[in-house]
Image (cartoon, grey):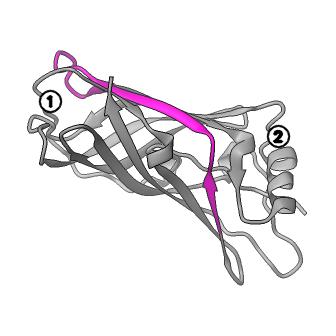
């Protein structure tokens, strides 16, 4: 039984460049001041759904960390990084989890799944408590030793003492060189859907 189940995400995660849906042009405006936030894992969630012929496999990421930083002096640029421990992915079945970690993700050789965000498009000039902002974020997802460009839409709710970044995107896993968990009549389908809701506090 070959298995597959990577995610990732922050807010992320991975549609190959040739399969991406064109994104409308968005005017980019920076926040009024430099901001840096650290994601709080205990208040956040990264989940995924992997469709098969007869049912949907649902899972989550348990161990990860990350941060994001924007500077008004560098409009359209950001420094975002999320590191996921490959052996922390859970699918609801211990035997399947073991196969995912050892035979699909090969977590011993590739212990981390990493998202690095580099640019954004959107109007963040109203980055103040009470605001809800949207943006298009582009970056790179590295998994199983393979790096691929990614692009996704996010929504950011700004609160007095934290922010919440949320979104969802399809992840095409074949380009990363991963096997699938298809067996007999049960076929695993590409892509998987990754959803994230990331709670972050200022640093």
Pointer 2: residues within 10 angstroms few (<14), some, or many (20+)?
A: some
Which tag, 2 or 1, sits closer to the chain's start? 1
Does the stretch in magenta take in 62? yes
Whole-percent x and y of residue 198? 41, 46
Does the stretch in magenta take in 119? no
Task: Tell me the SS state at disc 2.
Answer: loop
Whole-percent x and y of residue 32? 10, 26
Residue beneath label 1, please? 31
- Apparent side of residue 160 relative to residue 2 in the rendered image (left or right): left
The magenta-colored residue range is 58-78
- Apparent side of residue 136 relative to residue 60 in the rendered image (left or right): left
Examine the image and state in which quarter residue 102 appears: top right
How many marks do you count on the picture? 2
The residue nearer to you, when weighing 163 against 192, is: 163
The residue nearer to you, when weighing 24 against 71, is: 71
Residue 57, numbered circle: none
Residue 106, numbered circle: 2
Pointer 1: residues within 10 angstroms few (<14), some, or many (20+)?
A: some
Residue 17 appearing in the image: no
Residue 187 appearing in the image: yes
Q: Is residue 151 above or below residue 19?
A: above
- Apparent side of residue 145 relative to residue 182 in the rendered image (left or right): left
The overriding secondary structure of the stretch rendered in magenta is: strand
Q: Is residue 56 above or below residue 155?
A: below
Q: Is residue 108 above or below residue 72?
A: below
Task: Tell me the SS state at disc 1.
Answer: loop
Gap between marks 2 and 1, in whole Å?
40 Å
- Apparent side of residue 161 relative to residue 152 in the rendered image (left or right): left
Whole-percent x and y of residue 64? 58, 37
Whole-percent x and y of residue 94? 83, 60
């Amino acid at each position: 039984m070959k298995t597959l189940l990577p995610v990732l995400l922050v807010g992320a995660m991975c549609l190959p460049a040739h399969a991406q849906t064109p994104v409308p042009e968005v005017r980019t405006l920076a926040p009024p001041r430099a901001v840096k936030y650290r994601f709080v894992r205990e208040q956040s969630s990264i989940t995924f759904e992997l469709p098969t012929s007869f049912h949907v496999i649902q899972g989550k990421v348990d161990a990860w960390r990350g941060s994001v930083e924007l500077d008004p002096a560098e409009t359209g640029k950001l420094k975002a990084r999320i590191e996921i421990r490959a052996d922390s992915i859970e699918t609801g079945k211990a035997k399947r989890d073991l196969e995912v970690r050892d035979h699909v993700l090969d977590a011993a050789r590739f212990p981390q799944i990493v998202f690095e965000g580099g640019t954004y498009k959107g109007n963040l000039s109203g980055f103040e408590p009470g605001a809800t902002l949207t943006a298009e974020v582009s970056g790179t997802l590295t998994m199983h030793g393979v790096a691929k460009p990614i692009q996704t839409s996010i929504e950011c709710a700004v609160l007095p003492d934290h922010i919440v970044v949320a979104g969802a995107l399809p992840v095409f896993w074949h380009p990363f060189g991963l096997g699938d968990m298809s067996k007999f009549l049960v076929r695993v389908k590409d892509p998987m859907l990754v959803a994230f809701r990331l709670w972050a506090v200022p640093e």
